[in-house]
Amino acid sequence: MKPKTEYTKSGDFNIAYQVIGDGLIDILYIPGWVSNIDMMWSEPRLAAFLTRLSLFARLIIFDKRGTGLSDRSDEYSTMEERIDDINAVLDATHSKKAFLFSHSEGGSVSLLYSLKHPQKTLGVIGFGIFAKRRYSEDYPWAPTDEEREISNKAIEENWAHGNLDGLKTLVPSLAHDTAFLDWLASYLRSGGSPKAALILHKQCVKIDVTGVLESIKVPTLLLFRKEDIDILVEEGRYLSARIPNSKLVEFNGKDHLFWTGDTYPILAEIEEFVTGIRPNKLDFLNAKQKINKIGIDIETVMSKNFMYNLKIEEFAKLCGRSLSAFKRDFKKTFNTTPSRWIMSKRLEYAKTLLLETNLNVNEICYESGFKNCSHFIQSFKKNSNALPINTKQNHLKTLTHSLFGL
């Protein structure tokens, strides 16, 4: 089911993208806060939703700079840079025009893109999107500065471990599904390091498209669940009242994630908006039989994802296998156990980061997929007979001697 991951250049950044389906109409999915396009396919509900879109359109998905499989960054990307990333992906996929399907934080850039490039935008579809993320008297649904600080602290303290109680508020319908919440925590971690997640969360406060809404001319479909407590339905009504050619559809439900809960009415609205034809529910259910599963190459998936802090069970899901099948196929492919191979690859990757980047030891620890710094240092010392910091210092001394003949 997981499609091939490709890369394109946007300035100096490598942007990861995938193409699913071969429809005549293009849909570009612009995710929210953080994403990982490989990990999307390890969650059956999300994979089914994306695949369903590809039955009536060519679906293009990507990770924005600083997140997922795209190049990481120590700085938040500007809206102009994110627009450049979208153009790079559309050019790489030879897409002349596309519908922009956005979720949550991805909504603002989709609206701005449509304003800047209306000739490339067939329409905007936004699920649970917002106009701004800072409280004001005329926009009282956004968090206050005090509330944002509480969220920032929670990310700083809990991101690496996935102990974010707020995950349950994103998807109340699955609040008691431990396996799903574990996947969601892993998905977020694989989408951004603790530092990246915090930067994005803080910079989200700067997003404000309230002043341009009346200038947006492309058809806009706004989709909101009435009891979503993360992005309130009142925010959808605010957008709808100001975007001239817009349609607001309100659904029953509490989930902020579009692919959980009852997805038929959401997909039906999207298909009708894109094609002009609304599927009936029987046809919608029968369409599931058309979805062909594509074999997932375990070597490719593991080589691209070993640096993410996932459990063996989660790697098995990512590879589309049960745990027992994963271990069996892994042994055949690598002639060792998953744990030993992953540890070896992470240490090898960590050494590369030590020698070739300016990242500090703590940053390299998390970028390499380790749970905490002490575990990373102990493992590195056992493998290399030297501490990470000493390895870096010795490399710099050797480099200095080589350059200056000292």
Image (tube, grey):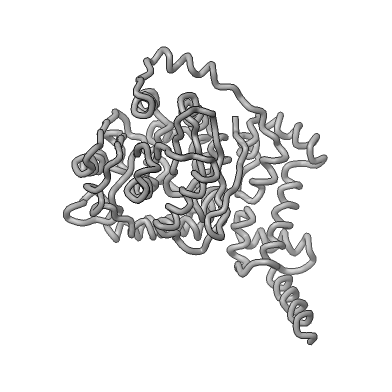
Of residues 43 and 274, the one nearer the viewer is 274
Q: Quadrant of the C terminus?
A: bottom right
Q: Is residue 309 above or below residue 367?
A: above
Q: Quadrant of the N terminus?
A: top right
Q: Residue furthest bottom?
A: 406
Of residues 286 and 6, the one nearer the viewer is 6
Counting from the top left corner in percent of width and height, residue 106 is at 39, 46
Q: Is residue 182 visible?
A: no
Of residues 279 and 87, the one nearer the viewer is 87
Q: Is residue 290 above or below residue 91?
A: above
Q: How many marks?
A: 0
Q: Is residue 328 above or below residue 302?
A: above
- What's the residue at 35%, 37% (across, down)? 123
- What's the residue at 74%, 57% (across, down)? 348
Counting from the top left corner in percent of width and height, residue 126 is at 34, 39
Counting from the top left corner in percent of width and height, residue 282 is at 41, 12
Q: Residue furthest right?
A: 335
Residue 263's quadrant in the figure?
Answer: top left
Left or right of residue 297: residue 204: left
Left or right of residue 355: residue 336: right
Of residues 287 and 329, the one nearer the viewer is 287
Counting from the top left corner in percent of width and height, residue 264 is at 38, 23
- What's the residue at 43%, 49% (across, down)? 33
Left or right of residue 400: residue 271: left
Q: Is residue 355 visible?
A: yes
- What's the residue at 68%, 43% (across, down)? 302
